[in-house]
Image: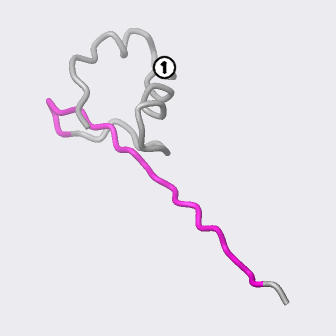
């Protein structure tokens, strides 16, 4: 008889916040720079050019 194992998959989310207004901009799945880059690249170019700072 073999043992049964269960793999746990952790799901992480990131919250994007406008630090000037303290308002939540969006919540998306992921937790690293690649996930952030993917999310940012999906935004409008005019919106992206107004980003001044990114903080961990």
Task: Name, please, the residue furthest toward the right.
Answer: 1
Task: Name, please, the residue furthest toward the left.
Answer: 20
Please say if 33 is above or below 27.
above
* Residue at 17% over, 33% down: 19
Q: The residue tagged with tag 1: helix, strand or loop?
A: helix
Give the side of residue 55 with respect to residue 14, left or right.
Answer: left
Please say if 20 is above or below 30.
above
Give the side of residue 38 with respect to residue 21, left or right.
Answer: right
Name the one closer to the observer, 32 or 20: 32
Identify residue for label 1.
41
- What range of the chain is rendered magenta? 3-22
Task: Name, please, the residue furthest toward the bottom.
Answer: 1
In the picture, which quadrant includes the N terminus?
A: bottom right
* Residue at 23% over, 39% down: 23
The location of residue 14, given as percent across then percent down, is 38, 44
* Residue at 28% over, 13% down: 50
The location of residue 54, given as percent across then percent down, is 25, 27
Please say if 6 is above or below 37.
below
Local packing at callout 1 (Cα closer than 10 Å; few below 14, some 14-19, many 20+) is: few
Name the one closer to the observer, 36 or 15: 36
* Residue at 46% over, 52% down: 12
Q: How many marks?
A: 1
* Dominant secondary structure of the residues highlighted in magenta in the image: loop
Whether 56 is among the magenta residues is: no
Give the side of residue 34 with respect to residue 19, left or right.
Answer: right
Whether 17 is among the magenta residues is: yes
Please say if 54 is above or below 10.
above
The location of residue 9, given as percent across then percent down, is 58, 61
In the picture, which quadrant includes the C terminus?
A: top left
């Amino acid at each position: 008889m073999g043992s049964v194992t269960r793999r746990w998959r952790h799901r992480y989310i990131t919250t994007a916040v406008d630090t000037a207004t303290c308002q939540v901009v969006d919540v998306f799945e992921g937790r690293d720079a690649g996930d952030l880059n993917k999310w940012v690249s999906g935004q409008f170019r005019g919106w992206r050019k107004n980003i001044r700072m990114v903080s961990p």
